[in-house]
Image (cartoon, rainbow, N blue to C red):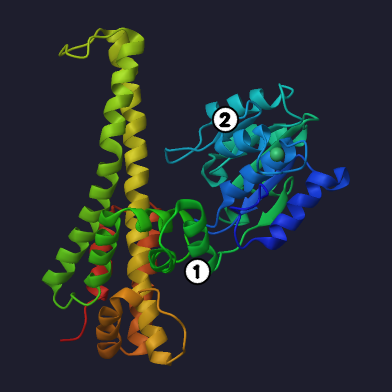
Amino acid sequence: MTVWRDVIGQDPAIATLSRAVTEPASMTHAWLFTGPPGSGRSVAARAFAAALQCPSGGCGECRECRTAADGTHADVDLIATEGLSIKVEQARDLVALAAHRPSVGTWRVIIVEDADRLTERAADALLKALEEPTPRTVWMLCAPSVEDVIITIRSRSRHVRLRTPSVEAVADLLVRRDGVDPPMAMYAARAAQCHVGLARRLARDENARIRRHDVITLASKIRTVGDAIDAASDLSTIATEESQASSAERDASEKAKLLEILGGDPSARTQPPHIRSQISSLEKDQKARATRFSRDMVDRALVDLLSVYRDALVLHTGAPTALVNEDARQTVQQVAQVLSPVRVLVAMDAIGTARERIAANVQPLLALEAMALELRLPR
Ligand SMILES: [Zn+2]
């Protein structure tokens, strides 16, 4: 057993990180972990943090290893933003934290999960800490790619690139770590296109599987303008439902907890001004979180939809490659039968454009409608 056991399919990265743990000359105070979503950037960063704190360099079993990995170690701080950006105030808090010596461990580790969401001012604030490092502090920044992080931060960090793990490696992890049945694990790993977190959710949540199936079948249903408009609205609804299902309960309990701390009366219709302002600031944060989550869900649905056309291309080429949607082969066949390879590529392009537009803050429904019109099958 080692601390690296859940860092799957990343042998070169593990070799680099292990060397940094054992050889002081290979260690540095700022690391940048990049890799596609779901490749396990924060899992790798946490394993590295554990290995640095562990007296035996990452046994995976001692108290240091366990607390570092689950985020409760006193000297390992994990910052994950739920809003659309990390603000300069948050960055300044981190810089202040970084100045402190570790309290119990060998290192003070600060993991920033979404370094790509640092605002420009927040990145500038962090930069100072990276330029004048405190001796026992290690920064671990995570982002999809190096281009997502401003160049001055990039040039002061050592880069660790993670790859997309194989379907087999993800399925194996689900079986070993989460106790999922092997056939379900294979389906989930493939359908999630090796996104570890998503594969886990698909394996464990039937509603997530149903929602995914609904998205996949849209590809064979769009024929008229009316169908296209309906499909866009379905996609948007699926994403909103997914987002609301996960946040409603949490929002309510956060609000109740805040009221309790402030000594407010939960049943009162209006609250005193000092409570009202705190509540409205919480609601603003919750709204930002919901916006981000709902946008992420739309993007995820588009990645799922894209996989149908990718599979249709596989059928066209006759390559013996496994389909992402082996479980929806009929839908893939229908699409491949009526769309030539060129038309399949046009459809894939339309989905790519919609994803870019939504990422650039175009209203999702508008972007989805424009896309769905391009996905109409010939009658
Ligand atoms: Zn250990």
| Quadrant of image for the C terminus | bottom left
Residue at the spot of label 1: 167
Q: Residue 201 or 176: which is nearer the viewer?
A: 176
Q: Residue at x 50, y 38 (%)?
A: 80
Q: Is residue 299 visible?
A: no
| Spot occupied by residue 300 in the image (x, y as percentages of width and height) | 37, 58
The amino acid beneath tag 2 is Thr
Q: Decide which of tag 1 and tag 2 comes sooner along the chain.
A: 2
The amino acid beneath tag 1 is Val
Compared with 182, 132 (above or below) is above
* Residue 123, quarter of picture: top right
Compared with 333, 52 (above or below) is above
Compared with 47, 379 (above or below) is below
Alpha carbon distance from label 1 to label 2: 31 Å
Mark 2 Cα within 10 Å, few/some/many (few <14, many 20+)?
few
Compared with 177, 230 (above or below) is below
**Res 157 label:** none
| Spot occupied by residue 304 in the image (x, y as percentages of width and height) | 35, 66
Helix, strand, or loop for circle 1?
helix
* Residue 66, quarter of picture: top right
Left or right, residue 318 beside residue 101: left
* Residue 65, quarter of picture: top right
Is the residue marked 2 within 8 Å of ligand 1, measured from its CB? no
Q: Residue at x 70, y 57 (%)?
A: 13
The quadrant of the picture showing ligand 1 is top right
Mark 1 Cα within 10 Å, few/some/many (few <14, many 20+)?
many
Left or right, residue 230 beside residue 211: left
Residue at the spot of label 2: 72
Helix, strand, or loop for circle 2?
loop
